[in-house]
Amino acid sequence: MAKKSSVAASANIYAREALPNGTLWLGAFSAAQYRSDVHAAVYRCRAAGTVGTVLSRDMRLEAGGPTIFEEFPRFLQAHSNNALKR
């Protein structure tokens, strides 16, 4: 098993920042600013209190590349507004 390194998200303000409300903010970046240690990394959330610490599961971030939005379907018609509930 590969050894994982643990670095606080706020350790590199250049590319990411941990906000006071617990949100991890990742700023926009150009292709020249892409860094695999930030934009293709595994992140975990950690919450600590008086009774202990809990860690989230690994979350893999894969950022980069152009975002492409496609309209589909272009025309949508609703023929019924019935909903099924089990």
Image (tube, rainbow, N blue to C red):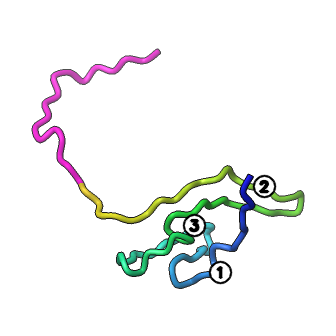
Residue in view at x 64 percent, y 53 percent:
58
Q: Residue 54 carries which label?
A: 2
Q: Which is nearer the N-term, disc 2 or disc 1?
A: 1
Label 2 to label 1: alpha-carbon separation: 20 Å
* Residue that badge 1 annotates: 11
Q: Tell me, yes or no, whether the highlighted magenta stretch contains residue 36.
A: no
Question: SS of the residue at dot 1?
Answer: helix
Residue at image location 24% in from the left, 24% down from the top: 81
Q: Which of marks 1 and 3 is in front?
A: 1
Could you tell which of marks 1 and 3 lies nearer the N-terminus?
Answer: 1
Residue 82 shown in magenta:
yes
Instruction: Residue lying at the far right in this picture: please name it.
Output: 51
Using the rendered view, name the quadrant where residue 83 is placed.
top left
Q: What element carries label 3?
A: loop
Question: How far across and how far down the image is residue 82, in percent?
Answer: 28, 20
**Mark 2 falls on what kind of element?**
strand
Q: Is residue 33 left or right of residue 22?
A: left
Q: Which amino acid does label 3 sit on?
A: Thr
| Closer to the camera in the image, 83 or 31 | 31
Q: Is residue 14 above or below residue 36?
A: below
Which percent across, then down, holds residue 32?
38, 80
Q: Nearer the viewer, mark 2 or mark 1?
A: 1
Contact between marks 2 and 3 (CB within 8 A): the answer is: no
Q: Identify residue type, mark 1.
A: Ala
- Give the class, few, some or many, for how many residues have Cα within 10 Å of label 2's Cα (few <14, many ≥20): few
Please count the marks in the image.
3
Quarter of the view holding residue 75: top left
Q: Main secondary structure of the magenta part?
A: loop
Q: Which residue is drawn at 51% across and 79% down?
A: 15
Q: What stretch is highlighted in magenta?
A: 69-86
Instruction: Say which residue label 3 marks.
Output: 23
Separation of disc 2 and disc 3 at Cα?
16 Å
